[in-house]
Amino acid sequence: MELFYGEDNLNTEVQEADGVYTLTYHTADKRPPIGTGLTLTVKFHGDSNMGSGEAVIEGVTLAKKSVSAVVDGTVTKPYDQNTDVPVSFKVEKDLVGEDTVTGTTTGAFEDKNVGTGKAVTVDAGDVVWNETSQ
């Protein structure tokens, strides 16, 4: 059994349990792309119990995987009378294999006054991801 995106074979892993087939593929090479309205084709090459065939699956949606990041290092900067502060982060779990995900973004201290132990707020929409797939 194989899974195709157009003419591109996604080199899937296939498991069968009680007549139900599960196809799994790895997204590291970014095919098919994240998005909606995708069309995939499953092809079965037949065996002694079942003939060959294929099924077209339309309207597939592939969504980004949610991950949780933690601050990497200390959030600090010289006093400059504003609240903006660079924040480095990393994802420590829910990754595939040897993948690493780190990034930087701009956070905001709770106020512009000098001090320690201040809360920092980060807007996840402003995150810059640095992904390394092994």
Image (tube, rainbow, N blue to C red):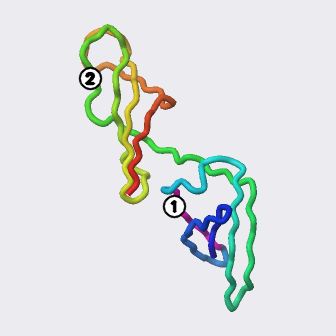
- How many numbered discs? 2
Residue type at numbered disc 1: His
Up-down: is 116 above or below 17? Answer: above
Is-magenta flag for residue 26? yes
Q: Is residue 61 magenta?
A: no
Q: Which residues are magenta?
A: 21-27
- Horizontal and vertical percent for residue 3? 63, 68
The quarter holding residue 79 reads: top left
In terms of image quadrants, where is residue 24?
A: bottom right
Q: Which residue is mark 2?
A: 76
Report the mark closest to the observer, 1 or 2. Answer: 1
Q: Quadrant of the N terminus?
A: bottom right
**Which amino acid, mark 2?**
Thr
**Are discs 1 and 2 less than 8 Å apart at CB?**
no
Q: Position of residue 60 (x, y in %)?
A: 70, 54
Vertical comparison of 99 with 91: above or below? below
Q: Residue at x 39, y 59 (%)?
A: 97
Residue at the limit of the structure toward the bottom, as seen here:
48
Q: Which mark is residue 26?
A: 1
